[in-house]
Amino acid sequence: MSSRLRLPALLLGLVLALGACIRGGGGEASPPPPSSAAPTATGPTPSPVGQGSAQAALAKLCKGFGVPAPSGVKPGGPVPPAIAQVEHQVEQVRHLDFLKPVVAQPVTHAELVNKLNGFFNEQFPGAFYDRRTRAWQTIGVIPENMSIMQAQRNFTSGQVIGFYVPETGELYFIGSENPSPLERLTLAHELTHAVDDQHFVLDRLDPLSVHCRDEAGAAAVAVVEGSAQFFSVQVALQFFSLQDRLALVQSLSQSQATPEGVPPFVMGLDTFPYTAGLVFVTALDTAGGLGGVNEALKTYPLSTEQILHPGKYPNDAPQPVDVPDLGPKLGPGWKDLDVQDVGEEWLLEMLDLQLERNRAQAAAAGWDGGIYRAWSEGVHTAVVMNTVWDTAGDASEFSHAMNDWIGSAARPASVRYDGGEHVTVLFASDDATLVKLQATL
């Protein structure tokens, strides 16, 4: 889903997916080069990995994730004509043929939510996300009465209208064998995942999630979802009648409300792969046609910065950043709680909670690397976020924005900036813990 809780095996379609884009078009399509699966690309290690490093701590904390085993599901019986028609339309706009049949199963909303809940229960370690919830609450990006897992369940039950499982080849969408325009659009989205998977092996995403490579994972998911967004729009533009398009826009306009129980921070992160991913893939198509899109599916971007600024792909890799182990300095009983890569999109959504959107965007731009590390002792939590920026000017702008953010949020936190390219932000569960954390530095 995003750089927070991401179903490593599932590629989701959202209700909000295409409402603003259905009237537009992409760049000129050109025949792609012969496709081939690339090896798993995890990108550069975002920070040092030696003993005591943040990445060493993450390796110990990142436990319990899984991916579905192949189910051996086989297509049964003839494909309904309406679904077969959308398959052919996807092949035409994608300039890729399906290499094997796809199991496209129309289901009810209740059945879809039930299947998603099954994946949640089987694939995601509740203890890991309980710890991350505590870190995010301490930073102040989610309410104290909201868990990440609950927010994700609320999001998927309210927004998801289809999903595809690369490991099994199964495809589910809310619809029937005679799909409406919205259902056909959803089906085209998920079928794009299927044909991309058959040519580019999308379960290469799994190691990023299983090893908690959140920033690189969010960037990779954005390419995959952006491709599905882009080509499903092309299906609608090329094959939907005017009446169908009007009905589609009406359906989407009635489905834009944020689901209840989804904090704005989580909503922003979870919709990022669909909105920013579409813009990124459109830019690739405009610059290099389908060959450019295919190349990004072979070699994933390394950061959300590259998604937000397509000109930085593929050459602008993030700098290594570390947070040393301050647990011993904090005192007896302080243990590692959580570690997470922090990218431009993560910082943008955080800043947007308290600042105007345009200022948040300006302050997050110029990011060149980031990570946070959290410790806990009883009810007390301490978090150190280290970031590095392209220039001292970028770092200064971020530090000023963070100081204003902290003042607006009225939380125990402080910014340390020495005038160079690094900015450190401290967060704590209470004032006494903040004082203790400041003393360790």
Image: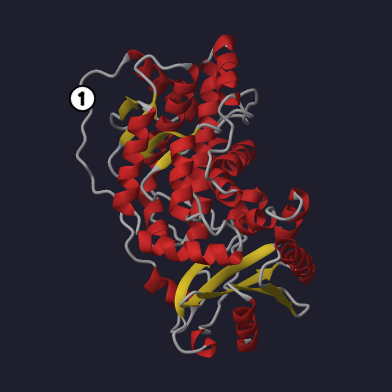
Please give left or right for residue 397 compared with residue 426 in the image. right
The image quadrant of residue 136 is: bottom right
Q: Is residue 13 in view? A: no
Is 183 drawn above or below residue 346 in the view shown? above
For the point 55% across and 19% down, the residue is 248
Residue 300 in the image: state x and y as whole percent: 50, 52
Is 32 drawn above or below residue 355 in the view shown? above
Q: Is residue 17 in view? A: yes
* Three-letter residue code for mark 1: Gly
The residue indicated by pointer 1 is 76
Residue 309 in the image: state x and y as whole percent: 66, 51
Residue neighbourhood size for the residue with mark 1, other residues' Cα within 10 Å, grouped as few (<14), some (14–19), many (≥20): few
For the point 59% across and 11% down, the residue is 242
Is 38 drawn above or below residue 169 in the view shown? below
Is 212 drawn above or below residue 235 in the view shown? below
Residue 114 in the image: state x and y as whole percent: 33, 37
* Image label count: 1
Q: Quadrant of the C terminus?
A: bottom right
